[in-house]
Amino acid sequence: MSQMPQQAAPAKCPSCAEPLESGDLFCGACGYDLSAVPAAPPDHPTLTMGAAGVGPSGVEWPPPEPEGSGTPPAPHLPTDLPGTDSGGKPLPGSTPPHGSPASPPPHGSPAHGSPVPPASGVRFDRPPEPDDYPLQAPDPRVAASAAETAETAGTDEAGGAGEAGETTELPKVCVACRAGRVDDDGYCENCGHAQPRERDHMEQEAGPVAAVSDRGLRHHRNEDAFAVGHTALPDGTPASVAVVCDGVSSATRPDEASMAASRAAIESLLAALAQGSHPQQAMHDAIVAASLAVNALAEEPSSAREHAPHQNAPACTLVGSVVASGLLVVGWVGDSRVYWVPVDRSAPAARLTEDDSWAAQMVAAGLMSEAQAYADERAHAITGWLGADAYELEPHTASFKPDRPGVVVVCTDGLWNYAETAEEMSEVVPADAAVRPLHAARVLVGHALDGGGHDNVTVALLPFPEPPQGAGSA
């Protein structure tokens, strides 16, 4: 999971790591010229959908088909409406249509009304958090057990389903002995094993999209979260959506931040797409909605701060993808990633996002090679995140139009740490991932666990192009 957010301006000398004061032009220890360290690299402009573009890793994405003549039908298709650049402004030569979503706040303006003052740095003096945390997602093992019981005993004597509104609470079965019942304290009455928290391992399918999240082997809880879904555009064209969030581990309540962000983003995306918004505009607005949801977690009573005055605000990263109407749209803040892996593995794979991290800044500035930067202990210090302590919200968005079928991999660094380059990711993604996304997601999580499982692991897979309605995992 991501490390504590860092300021975009270097807090230490890039040459000798000596702490710097605000306004320093030279390092007092080694004399390094600090003007040579540029600010965080600006987000690349979104690829204009009317012209061919070259995506990351040199993969060429062909332009969309030319628009037909005449008045476009109502409601508009996503490709008929203008997208936005990463700052939320309309693409060159386009104007927002009447009734389109309201423009986001100006670049650099706060995304909420009363931001909490930025944290001064990493907090080591906050009290330890409890061992037990709220459980927001059902345990897939319990869900499977419930499904089996309902299948055998859920019909009435006439063979039909029970009356609407009737619910039956089924006992939980121990995941260790598979025989004992689990008591209210979370222990098996037969073998005594403590049961895993429901969020330790989560799996979900939504139409053709699937995601898996696991606590990993080193952390005491899972601070990742995901949300997947699918909907239909106004013309009936299917659309798939996936959002993955990684809680900032050294912030307060990172598990709550990631869950709130993923839920807010998926709700915003599905609603906007169903109304006909351009997928890229929908992605931008979803990131803003997720930011507001995480900011709200910091709005606690003043009395709560009296007993823990040094707590910083909850924070997380976010990455998401939409596959709709022949477009592949990505959006992100932080260091979680999206990869493109074609079905034909002779074609090159590609990474579609750029990290908001210290390592990425050093590489972009030409101060370090990629190998040197990611080997540094500061590599995973993020420079962009969602949370009230964020200095500004900079949603990154981009659109692509692949010319061949493939699968979109949306993941946290708990996976890409074990398959960092696009080529490495392509090697570990199963060949049938586009038709069996849930199986493939399980394989990828297993790859990270086999590699050491040092972090929480979350991955979502979206087939491209979007399969017809009703198609799902084989």
Image (tube, rainbow, N blue to C red):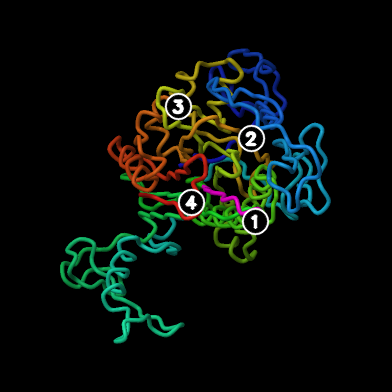
The magenta segment is 235-243
- Dot 3 surroundings within 10 Å: few (below 14), some, or many (20 or more)? many
The numbered dot on residue 274 is 1
Disc 2, SS: strand
Q: Which residue is mark 2?
A: 398
Which numbered disc, 3 or 1, marks the residue closer to the eye? 1
Front one among 33 and 322: 322
As shown in the figure, which amino acid type bears the numbered disc 1?
Ala
Disc 4, SS: strand
Do the CB atoms of the residues marked 3 and 1 lie less than 8 Å apart?
A: no
- Mark with earlier residue (4, 2): 4
As shown in the figure, which amino acid type bears the numbered disc 3?
Ala
| Residue at mark 4 to residue at mark 3: CA–CA distance | 22 Å
* Magenta residue check for 196: no
Q: Which residue is mark 3?
A: 422
**On the picture, is 468 further left or further right than 396?**
left
Residue 179 is situated, as x and y percent measured from the top left of the image, at 17, 69
Front one among 277 and 70: 70
As shown in the figure, which amino acid type bears the numbered disc 2?
Ala
- Dot 2 surroundings within 10 Å: few (below 14), some, or many (20 or more)? many
- Mark with earlier residue (4, 3): 4
